[in-house]
């Protein structure tokens, strides 16, 4: 599912704790009861991705294994 720009602007975004101040790969997330919204912090207006909380939890479980 996608988030439209007006909805994305109203969300409270958090930068990944692994994102440094020197650029590189930076991810921001915004959490709502129905979805986790994800965007590139370097290009926040280029679009977002929204996934269900269960999908995000499964992704995090897999990411923590590596």
Image (cartoon, rainbow, N blue to C red):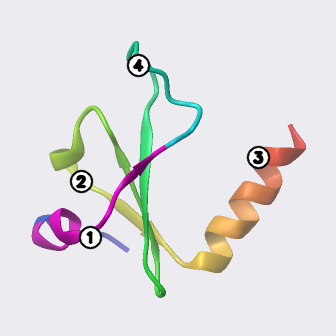
Task: Determine crowd level at label 1: few under 14, some 14-19, many 20+ residues with C-alpha closer than 10 A.
Answer: some
Residue designated by label 2: 47
Task: Determine crowd level at label 4: few under 14, some 14-19, many 20+ residues with C-alpha closer than 10 A.
Answer: few
Q: Earlier in the sequence, mark 1 or mark 3?
A: 1
Q: Is residue 43 left or right of residue 38?
A: left
Residue designated by label 4: 21
Q: CA distance from mark 2 to mark 1?
A: 7 Å
Task: Report the quarter where the C terminus lies.
Answer: top right
- Across and down, in percent, residue 60 comes to 72, 56
- Across and down, in percent, residue 37 comes to 41, 65
Q: Is residue 22 left or right of residue 48?
A: right
Residue designated by label 3: 63
Residue designated by label 1: 3
Task: Determine crowd level at label 2: few under 14, some 14-19, many 20+ residues with C-alpha closer than 10 A.
Answer: some
Contact check, label 4 and label 2, Cβ < 8 Å: no
The part of the image, by quadrant, that contains residue 10 is bottom left
Of the pair 56 and 16, the residue shown nearer to us: 16
Q: Residue furthest left?
A: 6
Of the pair 45 and 16, the residue shown nearer to us: 16
Task: Determine crowd level at label 3: few under 14, some 14-19, many 20+ residues with C-alpha closer than 10 A.
Answer: few
The disc placed on residue 62 is none
Q: Residue at x 70, y 68 (%)?
A: 57
Q: CA distance from mark 4 to mark 1?
A: 26 Å
23 w.r.t. 33: above or below: above
Contact check, label 2 and label 1, Cβ < 8 Å: yes
Q: CA distance from mark 3 to mark 2?
A: 23 Å
Magenta stretch in the rendered image: 6-15
């Amino acid at each position: 599912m996608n988030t439209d720009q007006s909805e994305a602007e109203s969300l409270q975004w958090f930068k990944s704790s692994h994102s440094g101040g020197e650029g590189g790969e930076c991810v921001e997330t915004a959490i709502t009861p129905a979805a986790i919204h994800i965007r590139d912090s370097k290009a926040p207006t280029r679009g977002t991705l929204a996934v269900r909380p269960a999908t995000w939890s499964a992704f995090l479980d897999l990411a923590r294994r590596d």
